[in-house]
Image (cartoon, rainbow, N blue to C red):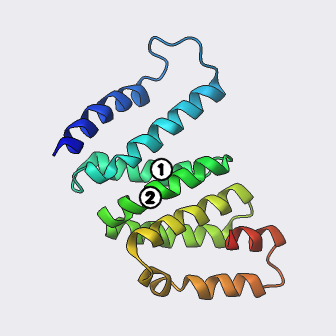
Amino acid sequence: EQGHKHAIRILNVLKGYLLHPKQGRTDLDTEKENLVLNLSLVLIASLAKFFDKSSEATLDIYERIIEMLNIPNKELKKSISKCISPLAKLLEAKSKKFMKQLIAMMLKTKDLSTLTGAAFAISGIVKGLGLKTIEEFKILDTLEEQANDKLSTPYKKVALLN
């Protein structure tokens, strides 16, 4: 009860910042501003366990943190991955849709940052939905295929096993 009330208050402050990041601020350059925006979103996502799963805001936050996984910062990707787990439990159907998209993305992309981002997202979804997800989406079979594929680039193999 208390957690929900405080989470909503914090969410409103952070949402205000996300919607109007430069309002009243002149001291942030673009790189710092992007970092603050990303960290704000991670904080919001970590509060997701207090949200109503039927809320449009919850789905929007989930979609935005999945999109954020293309950023090059590995530590931020790890934080995002941890935030994905409770959201995956909360929004199981959407998580399964994301899982299909992420696996397809991993198999098509040649960008290392995108590969590792997708790997972190998949690990967060698996943690949230449980080990049955590995079998349901044939993740181990896909990893084995990619590891044995002679045409697959070496960094892709590393990213898949990351």
Pointer 2 with pointer 1, Cβ within 8 A: yes
Most extreme residue toward the front is: 2
Q: Quadrant of residue 6?
A: top left
Seen at 69% across and 87% down, the residue is 145
The C terminus - image quarter: bottom right
**Where does the image place residue 61, in percent across and percent down from the top left?**
38, 47
Determine which residue is flagged by label 2: 84
Seen at 66% across and 61% down, the residue is 116
Side (left or right) of 18 relative to 11: right
The label on residue 65 is 1
Tell me the kind of residue under disc 1. Answer: Ile
Residue at mark 2 to residue at mark 1: CA–CA distance: 8 Å
Tell me the kind of residue under disc 2. Answer: Ile
* 126 and 34: which is toward the camera: 126
Which circle's residue, 2 or 1, is located before the other in the chain? 1
Side (left or right) of 73 relative to 125: right
Seen at 23% across and 50% down, the residue is 55
Q: Residues within 10 Å of mark 2 (few under 14, many from 20)?
A: many
**Where does the image place residue 58, in percent across and percent down from the top left?**
31, 50
Side (left or right) of 60 relative to 9: right
